[in-house]
Amino acid sequence: MQVASTGIKAIFFDIDGTLISFKTHTMPESTQQALHALREKGIKLFVATGRAPLMMPFLDKYFQFDAYLTLNGQYCYTPEGVIRKQMIDPGEIRKLKVLIKKHHFPCLFVHEKGGSLNFIDDRVRELFRMINYPLPEPKDLEDFPEDQVLQFVIFTPGEVVERVRQALPRVKLTRFMRTCFDAIPVGGGKDMGIQAVMDYAHIKQSETMAFGDGHNDIAMLKFARIGVAMGSSEDEVKEAADFVTGSADEDGIAKALRHFGLLT
């Protein structure tokens, strides 16, 4: 049964596993058609991703969004300029460097113009294969800036993750895959990115909808008026959503939009 969808004026989409298939590394035709149909209805369309700004241009071949919430909401911008930017405290980065030297794990430090990675192992290769993005060239840890980090990504087993949590109380970790964790400031997140966009675009929380598939999407799915989890999501993500649709490869976005009456 189709559900009436009154008042939705803005929709936020995760990228990997949501807009873009992990299997084909492309945007399904049904999703492209849905985005264009929504725009014709006057609905604002936004990206909400853990990816860095440098990784966004590839989307333009499919669709140009109204704004981009990158680095899990830490860096948000429109074609006109930046609307939210929150750095991680430099003191936390200094403590992180100590832990990296002690436990020897890969870490990707992301700043506004790019990122720095200390070394590459199989866990790093797996992530970049999943998101279909070239591996960065490793650099010396001592050369990494401490006062410009918007997000860092650690690749390590659970026991080291807990040591990072304990040592860095002003940082919040969210799992992307089994041994890969995004780290942002406490108080940050995709929900805070949505709030910044809402303020900028004069949109109410009751007028929002969000699609996601990962642990870093949970706060966003709970925050939006309607949160939709992709069928490929883990159970914890599905439980946070109002509705579970098919995977990206099963035309999940289009099916959910029809379910809520936003597409015919």
Image (cartoon, rainbow, N blue to C red):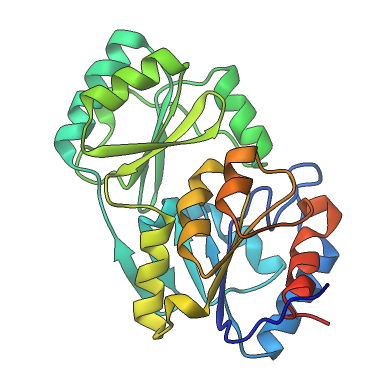
Residue 198, percent from left and from top: 40, 77
User: In the orientation shown, which residue stands out farthest toward the top?
Assistant: 102
On screen, 19 above or below 195?
above
Residue shown at 22% from the left, 18% from the top: 98
Residue 11, percent from left and from top: 58, 72
On screen, 20 above or below 98?
below
Residue shown at 61% from the left, 60% from the top: 242
Tally of numbered tags: 0
Residue shown at 34% from the left, 79% from the top: 199
Q: Nearer the viewer, residue 6 or 170?
A: 6
The answer to whether residue 59 is visible is yes
Residue 50, percent from left and from top: 49, 49
Q: Using the rendered view, name the quadrant where residue 116 is placed.
A: top left
**Quarter of the rendering occupied by the C terminus:** bottom right
User: In the orientation shown, which residue stands out farthest toward the front?
Assistant: 1
On screen, 172 above or below 204?
above
Q: Using the rendered view, name the quadrant where residue 32 is placed.
A: bottom right
Residue shown at 83% from the left, 51% from the top: 249
Q: Nearer the viewer, residue 213 or 82?
A: 213
User: In the orientation shown, which residue stands out farthest toward the left?
Assistant: 91
Name the side, left or right, on which 102 lies relative to 65.
left
Name the side, left or right, on which 20 lies relative to 71.
right
**Quarter of the rendering occupied by the N terminus:** bottom right
The answer to whether residue 50 is visible is no
